[in-house]
Image (cartoon, grey):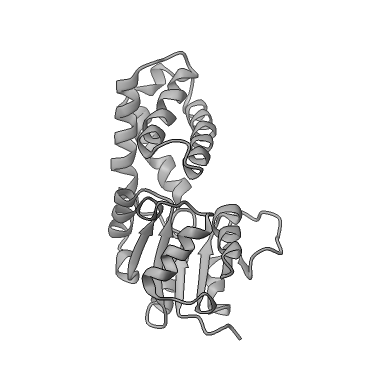
Amino acid sequence: MSKNYKFIFFDLDRTLWDFETNSLLTFKEIYKNRELYNIFPDFNSFIKTYKIINEDLWEKYRKGEITKLELRTNRFLLTLNKFNVNDIELAKNIGNDYINESPKKKEVFPHTYEILDYLYPKYNLIILTNGFKEVQTSKLKNCQLNKYFSKLICSEDTGYQKPNPKIFQYALSSLNAKKAESIMVGDDLNVDIIGANNFKIDTIYCNFINNEKSNIPTYEITSLKEILNIL
């Protein structure tokens, strides 16, 4: 029997919205339209290099070491630099293309709508994300997910990034929610789950890629459909 939860906080990327699939589709379009095949030996070289640089910059952004603008531009400029191209305008154009086009993609994880249809009448659903507000707003709208959520809380609005417990404090305070009646659903063990655990709220770990099982989350699922067994 589950606890008497009232508020369910969902991460968006890689939890509901299929970030990897949607990003790959977008980058394939950019690679072709921006003729990046003239710079990179193949598409995989572009993506592999970008992912390493992007993750490193996101970690710095989460720690407050770089700004949103620096992240957006430098992840593509540094990727180009790895292949001896130093074209700031091209980097900005790629960045703008990605920010404009990726939110239009509509792939979500299996059972997303089914689960939200089930949860919506019973709970207050909230998105709690480190993603950029304008991008996350577009994703929710284009996938018709926005109708399920009473609030979108982005880290840039709070001044704190998950896993900082202060973002969870902000989220609960903004809704007048109590820890005992709240639960966080997310795919990132370090960012979503440990962050929420440190704030002493329950968690559902979306282990969709079959990472090693962990004793950290309150619950662990491999499919969104398994939420039916919890809530």
User: Residue at coordinates 53% horizontally, 78% vertically from top-left?
Assistant: 228
Q: Is residue 100 above or below residue 206?
A: above
Is 149 displayed left or right of 13 in the figure? left
Residue 52, percent from left and from top: 54, 33
Please determine whether, in this image, residue 221 is positioned above or below residue 58: below
Res. 113 visible in picture: no
Q: Quadrant of residue 212?
A: bottom right
Q: Which x, y percent locates residue 146?
A: 31, 65
Q: Position of residue 32 (x, y in %)?
A: 35, 28
Q: Is residue 61 above or below residue 201?
A: above
* Of the pair 117 and 37, the residue shown nearer to us: 117
Is residue 202 found left or right of 111 in the rendered image? right
Q: Residue at 51%, 31% (x, y): give it.
A: 53
Image quarter in which the N terminus is found: bottom right
* x and y percentages locating residue 143 in the rendered image: 32, 59
Give residue 140's quadrant in the image: bottom left
